[in-house]
Amino acid sequence: MITYKPCLAFDTLCALAHNNVKCVRDAEPAVQAFMAMIREGLQLPPAVQKLSKVLECHFSLDDIEKMSVGELADIYPQLMANAAALHPSTEFLLKRKDDIAEGLRRMAEYDFEKFWRLHFYDALINFCDVYAKYMETFDLTGLLNDVKIIRQVNKVAQAATLCFAQTNSLAVEKIEDIRVYVSFFSSGTSYMLNINSYVQGYLPEHLKTPDRLMCTLAHELCHGFMSGELARLYQHAYNNDPFLHQTHWFLINCAGSTDEEELVVAIENFIAVRNGLRTLEQAKENIGNHRSLSCMPIAVILFDLLSKEPEIPSDINKWFIQCFESGYVDIGNIKSQADSLFGNFSAKFNETWNSDNPHTAEKCKKYSPLDVQNETT
């Protein structure tokens, strides 16, 4: 069973994190003015998944669904410090602790909840109803069976991605009672909460493209598979290849993704091809131009090999590890390897990097290129 619903707490955090996203840029002037007032003078991290993880480390999803903005503003500053001990990936939020607290204080003071219910709630409820009925028309058996193979290969790795309050109540391999929280301010971004729930952006146009909806479902449910050994190999690659170092920096700092993202994108598209949601060429195009950013060369390289497999590898971690250890992923030549598989990939990324998008342009100025001579293996 899949349930679709809005959630005030998650949408509040999305609104706090996502400045200048398309949904705000295209919104009516009252919405733009309200959000500008909330964010004025603050430096807020775009890492909405990590902001949400702070809540998950302390509360069940049922409790989070009931939270008001005032409650969120009161408890969140202290939760950040506690969450850093429980889930180290959230520690960097402490650098912006005061700005985050102030942003939430303003949202409570200016009654973001009333604003949200007035401008967005009805549209979100209607979208969730249409979304649920629409997804019921599709047979998801094959797709979910493929996801189960990914989820079963490394239960230890997946358990590490769960919030402590939920690790005892969920079987990693089970796919049941899936919750999808639809967020207006998440815009085009979706992100995993735990193994059976995720946040999905409010994108009515996706109802016209069922492959997008089902691929998002597969993508988010596959997150959490990455083993420590695979993570270290990927980190070694981007710390020793200048082009990958730059694309990875953009992926993390501008696109707000995680180290696992490139591998999940490769898996998602392989599952899509296997289940007739995309042709091979459509999948390659989707990866090469992912979210119109072209910043995932490892996804391009690994999908090209993965797409030749007759079945999903029984242990996807071992399969990816072999790709790195065998030298198939050609560290030091990632740029040319990606270009050979997806023509002009590096040129497309350069367009992304040099664009005048205000959401990324200022951040890119802070990038420090990899000094290969000083790198140690």
Image (cartoon, rainbow, N blue to C red):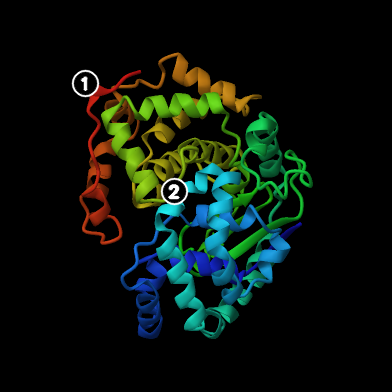
For this orientation, the residue located farthest to the top is 326
Q: What's the mark number on residue 373? A: 1
Residue sitting at x 36%, y 34%: 297
Up-down: is 370 above or below 121?
above
Identify which amino acid the numbered label 2 is placed on.
Phe
What percent of the width, then of the height, locates residue 26?
37, 74
Residue sitting at x 42%, y 29%: 235
Q: Quadrant of residue 138?
A: bottom right
**Label 1: few (<14), some or many (≥20) within 10 Å?**
few
**Label 2: few (<14), some or many (≥20) within 10 Å?**
some
Whether residue 28 is visible to the viewer of this picture, yes or no, is yes
User: As drawn, is 288 to the left or to the right of 138?
Assistant: left
The residue beneath circle 2 is 92
What percent of the width, then of the height, locates residue 168?
78, 44
User: As drawn, is 237 to the left or to the right of 355?
Assistant: right
Identify which amino acid the numbered label 1 is placed on.
Gln
